[in-house]
């Protein structure tokens, strides 16, 4: 599954974000570098939600940060609003930032404990001098109301006085203050209780409709992404395994890794017998990834071919693209 | 944190430091005998033996109380100035290098380590020997020049101490998601440092700076004891230095300045600890 290739890219007129052959390397020493993201391509059409799933350490969060130029990109391109984020200078990137915002995994750590909720939410407005002080204050109240936080009660308290779910609401309000086009959610619910997860997911859906957002939703939890995604991209060790619509991904996963992931989703019904595919072994070290298909060391269908040749993404029909030499039927 | 909530030791520390500050600010207006007035009628007066000299006198007949009160200003000012300037330079270097990382961080950190590896006393002695001595031994080096050199050497000692604290705290705070969030909102690095890094790093610096004040008072005293401090002037360190030969027949003349020095250092340490535990509890809430 080491998929490279771009057959899944669509050339429509209203592409918001287009990532091609993105590589992000971290130097471990002068000689050794780890490729956290190695040659990922995808595009995102206005109003879509692309979910990126994969196990811990597969490069999901790195990918999210690289898209926003929060990390140095080794090679590849990130086209957003008509410019390649990886080629333009720092100030030009900064000027694009209001159009792309991010929500982080740890809601409490993403809010500075020294500031009040009102100060935190108005911060982006102040950076970009949007409106007068009164206009900003009206906007902050409106944002807080829209995420279900009462500005009269909560506005002047500090962020650490709130629970994780409330903090996540506050950071959603903050990220929407500049009315971005693109919102990248990096595991926005994985630090929250299951009951709160649903609330936050609903809130994100509401906000998406209200503000016409295009979203990238990063998660390790397939049951979470099912409800929110237009397309799902499955990653393994920095490569794409499969890109598909949620229905086709859940009903007929083509990649053996996706199949194992989907079968691991718990079904809250004790009467149902589930057949689980348990993957053997640990993911290989990204410092020294396997040759050919990166998943072959744990794949039940691996052959000689998988070790020598890297599979390219191919169209399996029904909006399903898979990078595998021996896809499932 | 309110004064009432403090423990008994911390309360005592606050009171003692207030007293010291009072001595520093108003000492010169308190009607006292001249601190270096050679009183031939009252040499080696014991503790509480005389109304005229409540804390007694040393073997020169110098009044210990007036030395303690008037010595507070040079001692405290030397340590406050050197911790202040050294802390400012050190934290600025530490915060910027830790935030920027890379080569700058490597260079700054190496410099910190080099300075830290030189013992404070050796550095002080060396600097005084080079900068505050006169080739002609008959010409006295003015005390003011010595004071400047002592402040300079103590500042150099403090820079890496507080610099490393600032660097460490910045390294941990700048990895927080709110700093990444601020960048993703388009905040400039200088704004991020001023709005999000400095306010969070400051408590750690304050806490260690308090401890450092205590250490610096002791180092200044040690320099005096070694004869390179403000020997002929009035300071707590020079009091100790002056009577170091008299321990046998006038022990109180040594005990008085040592106790004053020790109380001040302990009070600074105590308040530094209180500040640090305050910092920890707020960390625990995160």
Image (cartoon, coloured by chain):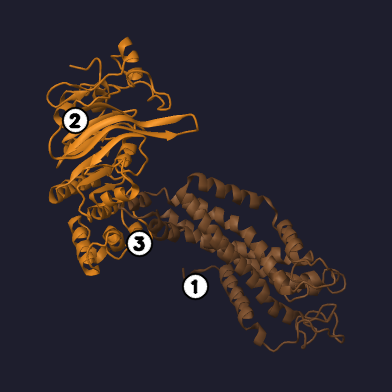
Chain colours: A orange, B brown
- Between label 1 and label 3, give the one nearer the viewer: 3
Q: Residues within 10 Å of mark 1 (few under 14, many from 20)?
A: few
Q: Which residue is mark 3?
A: A115
- Between label 2 and label 1, give the one nearer the viewer: 2
Q: Which mark is residue B230?
A: none
For mark 2, name the chain: A
For mark 3, name the chain: A
Among the two numbered marks 3 and 2 on one chain, the one whose residue lies closer to the N terminus: 2
CB under 8 Å between discs 3 and 2: no
Quarter holding residue B267: bottom right
For mark 1, name the chain: B
Query: Percent position (x, y) of residue A167?
Result: 29, 53
Q: Residue at x 41, y 26 (%)?
A: A285
Query: Percent position (x, y) of residue A72?
Result: 37, 40
Residue A189 seen by the camera: no
Query: Percent position (x, y) of residue A18?
Result: 22, 36
Q: Which residue is mark 2?
A: A9
Q: Residue at x 79, y 71 (%)?
A: B254
Quarter holding residue B123: bottom right
Q: Which residue is mark 1?
A: B4
Q: Residues within 10 Å of mark 3 (few under 14, many from 20)?
A: some
Find numbered disc 1 in the image and state the secondary structure of the residue it sits on: helix
Q: Residue at x 20, y 37 (%)?
A: A50
CA gap between label 2 and label 1 equals: 67 Å
Q: Are marks 1 and 3 on the same chain?
A: no
Q: Which quadrant of the rendered structure holds the C terminus of chain A?
A: top left
CA gap between label 1 and label 3 equals: 26 Å
Query: B11 or B243: nearer the eye?
Result: B243
Left or right: where A229 falls relative to B69? left
Left or right: where B9 falls relative to A210? right
Find numbered disc 3 in the image and state the secondary structure of the residue it sits on: loop
């Amino acid at each position: 599954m080491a998929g490279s290739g771009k057959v899944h890219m669509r050339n429509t007129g209203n592409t918001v974000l287009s990532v091609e052959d993105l590589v992000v390397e971290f130097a471990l020493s002068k000689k050794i570098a780890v490729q956290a993201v190695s040659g990922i391509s995808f595009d995102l059409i206005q109003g879509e939600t692309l979910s990126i799933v994969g196990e811990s350490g597969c490069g999901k969060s790195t990918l999210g940060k690289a898209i926003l130029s929060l990390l140095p990109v080794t090679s590849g391109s990130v086209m957003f609003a008509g410019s390649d984020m990886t080629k333009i200078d720092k100030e030009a990137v900064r000027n694009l930032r209001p159009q792309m915002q991010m929500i982080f995994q740890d809601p409490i750590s993403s809010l500075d404990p020294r500031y009040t909720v009102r100060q935190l939410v108005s911060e982006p407005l102040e950076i970009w001098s949007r409106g007068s002080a009164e206009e900003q204050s009206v906007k902050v109240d409106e944002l807080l109301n829209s995420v279900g936080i009462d500005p009269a009660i909560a506005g002047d308290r500090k962020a650490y006085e709130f629970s994780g779910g409330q903090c996540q609401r506050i950071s959603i309000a903050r990220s929407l203050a500049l009315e971005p086009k693109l919102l990248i959610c990096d595991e926005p619910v994985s630090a929250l209780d299951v009951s709160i997860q649903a609330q936050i997911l609903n809130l994100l859906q509401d906000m998406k409709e209200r503000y016409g957002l295009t979203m990238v939703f990063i998660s390790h939890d397939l049951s979470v992404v099912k409800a929110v995604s237009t397309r799902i991209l499955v990653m393994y060790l920095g490569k794409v395994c499969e890109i598909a619509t949620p229905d086709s991904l859940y009903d007929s996963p083509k990649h053996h890794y996706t199949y194992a992931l989907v079968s691991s989703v718990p079904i809250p019904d004790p009467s149902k017998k589930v057949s689980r595919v348990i993957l053997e072994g640990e993911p290989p070290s990204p410092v020294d990834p396997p040759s050919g298909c990166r998943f072959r060391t744990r794949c039940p269908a691996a052959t000689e071919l998988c070790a020598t040749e890297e599979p390219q993404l191919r169209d399996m029909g029904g909006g399903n693209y898979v990078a595998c030499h021996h896809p499932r039927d | 944190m309110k004064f009432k909530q403090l423990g008994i030791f911390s309360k005592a520390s606050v009171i003692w430091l207030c007293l010291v500050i009072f001595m520093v600010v108003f000492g010169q207006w308190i009607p006292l005998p001249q601190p270096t007035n050679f009183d031939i009628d009252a040499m080696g007066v014991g503790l509480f033996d005389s109304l005229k000299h409540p804390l007694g006198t040393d073997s020169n007949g110098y009044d210990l109380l007036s030395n303690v009160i008037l010595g507070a200003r040079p001692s405290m000012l030397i340590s406050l100035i050197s911790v202040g300037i050294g802390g400012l330079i050190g934290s600025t270097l530490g915060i910027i290098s830790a935030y920027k990382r890379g080569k700058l961080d490597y260079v700054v950190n190496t410099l910190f380590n080099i300075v830290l590896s030189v013992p404070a006393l050796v550095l002080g002695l060396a600097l005084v020997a080079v900068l505050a001595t006169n080739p002609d031994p008959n010409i006295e080096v003015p005390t003011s020049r010595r004071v400047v050199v002592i402040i300079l050497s103590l500042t150099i000692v403090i820079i890496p101490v507080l610099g490393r604290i600032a660097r460490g705290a910045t390294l941990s705070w700048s990895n927080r998601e709110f700093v990444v969030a601020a960048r993703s909102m388009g905040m400039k690095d200088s704004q991020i440092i001023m709005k999000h890094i400095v306010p969070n790093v400051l408590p750690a610096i304050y806490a260690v700076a308090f401890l450092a004040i205590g250490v610096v008072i002791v180092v200044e005293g040690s320099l005096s004891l070694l004869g390179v401090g403000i020997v002929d002037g009035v300071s707590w360190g020079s009091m100790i230095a002056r009577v170091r030969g008299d321990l046998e027949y006038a022990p109180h003349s040594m005990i008085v300045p040592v106790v004053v020095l020790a109380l001040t250092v302990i009070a600074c340490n105590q308040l530094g600890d209180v500040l640090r535990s305050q910092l920890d509890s707020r960390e625990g809430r995160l």
